[in-house]
Image (spheres, rainbow, N blue to C red):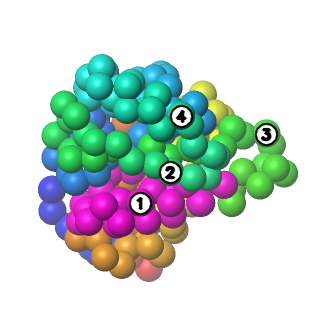
Amino acid sequence: MGFSASGPVEAICADIATLAVDVVVNAANRELRRGSGVCGAIFAAAGPALDDACAAIGGCATGDAVATDGFDLPARWIVHAVGPVWHGGDDGEADLLASCYRRALAVGRDLGARSIALPAISTGIYGFPPDAAAAIAVATARANATGWDHIVLCAFDTDTLARYQALLRPI
């Protein structure tokens, strides 16, 4: 993976569980249980030890993040970030989504990581509008890029990738 014109932040379309970065971020639920989408893919690829590690932690608040080992992933660590469920936008969802991205980056930085891959948090079954979520992800990644060699916004589909790329174009 190379650097894009936007500095250490770039967007790619890939299966996040296959990326050889220091940290992959899981779009986690508050219980830190195996879920669907990105969460299910990460749990499946990491192996059963991830279930035990998450059970030992017990949970995580919306807008926060916690870390586990990467187990069978190419990544050394998994940071589990809990995004908000969309309730129409008047329950602080945007602030909570920005917080979970900030916290994921801070937890990864505290681990000593230099590269991190972030999924499109809350845009699946949590229903966050994709355009607004992409804008929050890009702005938060750029604002918190200090200390990172590489921040990857990992899209699982071409529509999300196009959103990220449009937002990452130089002004």
Q: Amino acid at mark 4?
A: Gly
Of tags 4 and 1, the one toward the viewer is 4
Can you say which quadrant of the picture contains the N terminus?
Answer: bottom left
SS of the residue under disc 3: loop
- Report the residue marked by disc 1: 107
Q: Earlier in the sequence, mark 4 or mark 2?
A: 4
Q: Amino acid at mark 1?
A: Val
Left/right of residue 68 with respect to residue 74 in the rendered view: right
Q: Quadrant of the C terminus?
A: bottom left
Q: Is residue 99 magenta?
A: yes
How far from the left and from the top, in percent, is residue 47? 26, 23
- Identify the secondary structure beneath mark 1: helix
Whole-number angstrom distance, CA of label 4 to CA of label 1: 17 Å
**Disc nearer the start of the sequence (4/3):** 4
Circle 2 is placed at which residue position?
Answer: 65
Left or right: 115, with 79 as reference point: left
User: Which region is colored magenta?
Assistant: 96-118
Query: Was residue 112 drawn as part of the magenta stretch in this picture?
Result: yes
- Sequence order check, earlier mark of 3 and 1: 3
Whether residue 94 is visible here, answered yes or no, is yes
Marks 1 and 3: in contact by CB < 8 Å?
Answer: no
Q: CA distance from mark 3 to mark 1?
A: 27 Å
Residue where numbered disc 4 is placed: 58
Residue 29 at x, y percent in the picture: 56, 33
Q: Alpha-carbon distance for marks 4 and 2? A: 12 Å
Identify which residue is drawn at 44% across, 73% down: 144
Check disc 3 and report the residue beneath it.
87
